[in-house]
């Protein structure tokens, strides 16, 4: 998995060796926490396989879902750059295998690898654009558009580079990411399928018009 990532492919042999030695692997069960809000940001994370959601759970019971992270996605670089507690939770929506790069290794690569620096800058810029778009859909668009753009975010070419046109995801998982009920997701998917943006199969969806999903409702 590490060799397939764009940032690892750009490293020198020595830098790649340091990166590999600084990574441990974790298996997180469905519903388990990859990382907790408020804890020290000791690792940069990448999803090897599975699916997780970045969210914030409040003591009042309210939950804000930010985005999903599928296989090939890395996250947490902002927290690694700041000396403050992590500001979100990441929860596994199914059994998920995660690569965890130690903080010391992450900062060593920042100090010594120009390709790694470029990757992190691009990653932060792309995630900012993603979050602005998701915030727009949350505040200005209807539920169908929120579902469409939540799905489109899972196919982001930079943040989720390993995903092809089909993803194994349930309607319940989409609902967790979009912040709506499974029944409402079902209605939105039927609409999107009728309009030719995607097709649904048991246990997954195939995207036919990614740009259309990104613009849906806007």
Image (tube, helix red, strand yellow):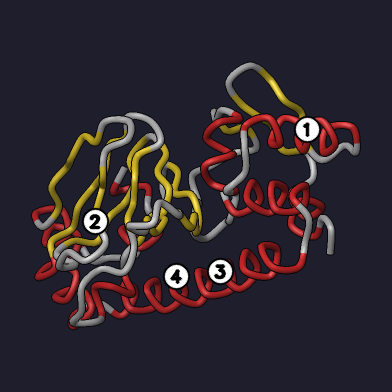
Looking at the picture, tell me which residue is in the foreground, 6 or 65: 65
Crowdedness of circle 4 by 10 Å Cα count: few (<14), some, many (20+)? Answer: some
Residue 46, image x, y percentages: 31, 51
Residue lying farthest right?
195
Asked if the residue under mark 4 is in contact with the one under mark 3, i.e. CB atoms within 8 Å, the reply is: no
Residue 162, image x, y percentages: 48, 44
Q: CA gap, disc 3 to disc 1?
A: 25 Å
Could you tell which of marks 4 and 2 lies nearer the N-terminus? 2
In the picture of the structure, the residue carrying the numbered disc 1 is 187
Residue lying farthest front?
60
Could you tell which of marks 1 and 2 lies nearer the N-terminus? 2
Q: CA gap, disc 3 to disc 4?
A: 12 Å
Q: Nearer the viewer, mark 1 or mark 4?
A: 1
Up-down relation of residue 6 to residue 34 (above or below)? below
Q: Nearer the viewer, mark 2 or mark 3?
A: 2
Q: CA gap, disc 1 to disc 4?
A: 33 Å
In the picture of the structure, the residue carrying the numbered disc 3 is 131
Looking at the picture, tell me which residue is in the foreground, 175 or 5: 175
Q: Where, by quadrant of the figure, is residue 121 drawn?
A: bottom left
Up-down relation of residue 12 to residue 217 (above or below)? below
Q: Nearer the viewer, mark 4 or mark 2?
A: 2
- Disc ID at residue 2: none
Q: Secondary structure at mark 1?
A: helix
Left or right of residue 158: residue 39: left
Q: Where, by quadrant of the figure, is residue 70 drawn?
A: top left
- Disc ID at residue 36: 2
Q: CA gap, disc 1 to disc 2?
A: 33 Å
The number of discs equals 4
Q: Nearer the viewer, mark 3 or mark 4?
A: 3
Looking at the image, which residue is at 33% across and 74% down?
78
């Amino acid at each position: 998995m590490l060799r397939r990532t764009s940032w690892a492919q750009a490293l020198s042999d020595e830098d790649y060796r340091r990166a590999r030695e600084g990574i441990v692997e974790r298996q997180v069960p469905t519903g388990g926490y990859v990382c907790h809000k408020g804890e020290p940001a000791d690792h940069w994370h990448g999803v090897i396989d599975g699916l997780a959601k970045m969210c914030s759970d409040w003591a009042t019971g309210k939950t804000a879902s930010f985005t999903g992270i599928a296989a090939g996605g890395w996250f947490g670089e902002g927290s690694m750059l700041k000396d403050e507690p992590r500001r979100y939770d990441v929860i596994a929506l199914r059994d998920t295998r995660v690569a965890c790069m130690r903080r010391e290794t992450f900062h060593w690569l920042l100090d010594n690898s120009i390709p790694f620096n470029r990757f992190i800058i691009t990653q932060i810029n792309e995630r900012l654009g993603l979050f602005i778009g998701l915030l727009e859909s949350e505040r200005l668009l209807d539920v169908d558009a929120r579902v469409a753009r939540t799905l489109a975010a899972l196919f982001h070419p930079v943040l989720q580079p390993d995903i092809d046109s089909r993803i194994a995801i349930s309607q319940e998982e989409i609902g967790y990411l979009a912040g709506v009920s499974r029944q409402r997701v079902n209605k939105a998917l039927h609409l999107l399928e009728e309009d030719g943006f995607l097709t649904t199969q048991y246990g997954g969806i195939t995207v036919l018009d990614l740009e259309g999903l990104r613009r849906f409702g806007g």
